[in-house]
Amino acid sequence: MQNHLVIIGSVWPEPTSTAAGTRMLQLIAMFQKEQYQITFLSSASKSDYSYPLENLNITTHPIKLNDTSFDSLLSVLNPNIVLFDRFMIEEQFGWRVAKNCPNALRILDTEDLHFLRKARETAFKQDRIVQPEDYLSDIFKRELASIYRCDLSLIISEHEMELLTQTFKVDTSILHYIPFLVDPISKSLLNSIPAFSERKHFVSIGNFLHEPNWQTVLQLKKLWKSIKKVLPEAELHVYGSYATEKAKQLHNVKEGFLVRGRAESVEAVFHSVKVLLAPIPYGAGLKGKLLESMLFGLPNVTTEIGSEGMQGDLEWNGFISTTDEDFIEKAIELYQDNTLWQQSQKNGIELINKRFEKSLFENKFFTKINHLLANLNQHRNQNFLGQVFQHQTLQSTKFMSKWIELKNSVQ
């Protein structure tokens, strides 16, 4: 009998808009390779950029929050595995899954650790370094509770694995490291894409609705004048989906700071420019823009936050800067030095092949999944804190949901 995976998404995947959308399609491809039947559910509205999941033979259903129609649908679907896309979705639907499909393996895809991003945002806005107490927000408590309630949580970054296991003592049995998953790159790629001499200008890219991306654009606006002064012919092309009015107001042709909006083809854009600039001030997880720069042979300059969890002990695909002055200097150097640029490009290919090539992770993941499916009761009994959170936290979540459902029914 074919295994059945139900994914409950916070949104319908948009791989052309967000790294999270790309990540979801990577997970879907991995399960389909193992012959899983997949059903995707979401209470969000679809956009013009939502991926046509039906083209992948995935069944889709819109669902409602705080409504028993979800219970009926899930009972009919009767999946082996339910995957929650972000902890907020587990909060909303986890108790219903536990009630209607108690034998289904419950997996949380964290995307990134929201509490880590929030702690860094707080420190950034107060112009200071992160303190241990910054982590201990309401988001931290909610996210950790969700991790414990699930049978397995997917962690995208080695740094986040270390934070959870070393600092917060989360047992490794309920965590699994699985980064971005891509096909290997051959060195012949270098012969098939435009050379250093055929390129010009800088680029930045990122969904404008994501606050760390917006702060990155503001950092670029601050740094760009110093780069432009040394490289007067260069332009900075700022791409990103869902460009806001405040972002468009930064567009300045005279300064060579050009806000372009959504990129129709990231590959085409990345093949035309010399350097990606990503002075990311805070965030969490892995940065899709930096992975794509490596995939498409484009060197970059970023920050320690930008490169976090990606480099390992390998050389970076360009430079990792620690100060504004260093960022400006390295951006100019990488833009002008052909030999340095080519070596950085090769470093990116090595990083992809040694740290993100999907075959490095697929077998380990399904070995873990199959073990959990065969030993689910034992696994849950050992995760006794998960049972505590399941009982305590979801009682309040459940009754709040029931109250909203009743309130909606009488309106």
Image: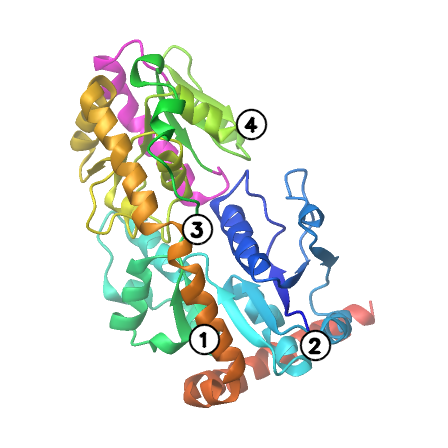
N-terminal label among 2 and 3: 3
What's the mark number on residue 181? Answer: 3
Question: In this rendering, which labeled residue sits more in front, label 4 or label 2?
Answer: 4
Question: In this rendering, which labeled residue sits more in front, label 2 or label 1?
Answer: 1
Q: Which residue is mark 1?
A: 145
Q: Is residue 142 visible from the viewing direction of this image? A: no
Q: Amino acid at mark 2?
A: Trp
N-terminal label among 2 and 1: 1
Give the alpha-carbon distance from disc 4 to disc 3, as whole Å.
22 Å
Q: Residue at x 81, y 71 (%)?
A: 409
Magenta part of the chain: 207-235
N-terminal label among 4 and 2: 4
Element class at badge 2: helix
Tell whether label 1 touches label 4 (CB within 8 Å): no
Give the alpha-carbon distance from disc 4 to disc 1, as whole Å.
39 Å
Q: Amino acid at mark 1?
A: Ala
Residue 345 appears in which quarter of the rendering? top left
Q: Position of residue 140 (x, y in %)?
A: 39, 68
Tell whether label 2 touches label 4 (CB within 8 Å): no
Foreground pick, 273 / 220: 273
